[in-house]
Image (cartoon, rainbow, N blue to C red):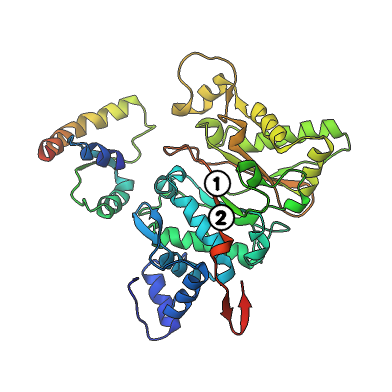
Amino acid sequence: MTEMLSAADESAGLEKLHAMRCTDGLPVVIPTRARVDRLVLATGQDADMVLGTMGPAGGTATIEKVAVAAVMAGCLPDHMPVVIAAVQAVVDPAFDLTEMQSTTHCTAPLVIVNGPARAACGGISGGFGALGPGHRANASIGRALRLAMINIGGARPGESDMALLGHPGKFTYCLAEDEESSPFAPLHTSLGFTPDDSAVTVIGAEAPHSVLYSPTGDIAGDAKRMTEVLAIGLANMATNNAQLRNGAAVVVLNPEHAEVYRKANMSREAVQKALYDLCYQRPEELKRLAGGFAPKGEDRGPVHSFRSHEDILVLVAGGTGLYSMVMPTWCAGPHANRYVTKKVELDVYCEVVIGGTATA
Amino acid sequence: MRDGISVANLGIPAVSLVTEKFWPQGDFVANSIGMPGLPRVQLPHPTGGTGRDNMRHIAERVVPEIVAALRKAS
């Protein structure tokens, strides 16, 4: 059972939570017993069921503690399946949460949602401004994960979270893939799930970097040039992907850019392989600019930024236009900043009534 | 810090070297694992990337502290 705090009223409670460094700096919904119980009920799980351990503090992420974070973030019961799956992803040892929370790098968990949960869990946006303000499910789900990382994982700036500046995605960083606009199979089906499954893929990532490409109508030429521009954004010499190498990264194609690849008959795998081929540095440049991160030994041709094309996540989201996004990553930790995908278990969740309205 | 903890858990005396800017994080990690007295020696910040000569100078200054911490830990 979680320890209960008391305050004279909600306003005093909010100030208490701020003073205890239990917030992200913004106002939170006060996690009263009734509000937390409602979200626990929505999960269909026991309150004390353990999802895993969250570093660096080593706190135990139970359903109830995650529900506390979700209440504070403003989540609805419908959001809980995705919140729980996102927590399951970051507590997977392959995610290296302790190291990620502690690093000086600017990294935040980007939550990518695929499958029916996109609609069933509150309407998670993969369209215009999906990573910006105005999308309640995106904002609340990503924020719930962050508040869990603060209050269960113990990440606090300058004390245990040593990010030199961080980035705004550390408040919330969640979007859905626009599967309907994508020429590719849904991302999660490339990662072992079926189209009817729902899944979250979580990766520690930098803030999104905009990549401008203006198609010319030359089908083959556009695909080639756009890939070149994306590769520059993904692993230019300023990135950890170029200097540290062997991590993962994300490419979010807007539907217009995805259409370029559709016209060129390029699958997701073909795009990944083309990006892999173009993401490299010359050894002499790494030695000149990358200091202690430069590879040791003899120069043996191009030094690839990625171990495999599969380390480059390619998805479709956003409004249509000339801008796609790339998210380079930290590339460190024991597993070199891998992404982790977890199934969203929609079947176990309960219908919860809010103000007379049933939500599934 | 965590490397030092891992080595200590193997039964090998260990001391963690932590720069002054990261000392509070060292406090956090030591406390979070229930080992507030974990042997640590403070280095100036930054230490890495300051050149071989400076790092040698720092090393010469802190070696006695490291040896003393290891003797105390063993």
Which residue appears at 28% of the width and 54% of the height? B32
Task: Looking at the picture, tell me which residue is in the foreground, A26 or A48.
Answer: A48
Q: Secondary structure at mark 2?
A: helix
Task: Looking at the picture, tell me which residue is in the foreground, A143 or A268.
Answer: A268
Determine the residue located farthest toward the right in the rendered image: A217
In this rendering, the answer to whether A187 lies above or below A6 is above
Which residue appears at 10% of the width and 36% of the height? B71
Which comes sooner in the sequence, label 2 or label 1?
2
> For mark 1, does the 10 Å Cα neighbourhood hold few (<14), some (14 to 19), or many (20 or more) residues?
many
Q: Which residue is mark 1?
A: A205
Labels 2 and 1 touching (C-beta < 8 A): yes
Task: Looking at the picture, tell me which residue is in the foreground, B30 or A65.
Answer: A65
Which residue appears at 71% of the width and 34% of the height? A271
> For mark 2, does the 10 Å Cα neighbourhood hold few (<14), some (14 to 19), or many (20 or more) residues?
many
Instruction: Tell me, for residue A215, which label it has, or none.
Output: none
Q: Is residue B33 visible?
A: yes
Q: Is residue A209 visible?
A: no
Which residue appears at 70% of the width and 30% of the height? A274
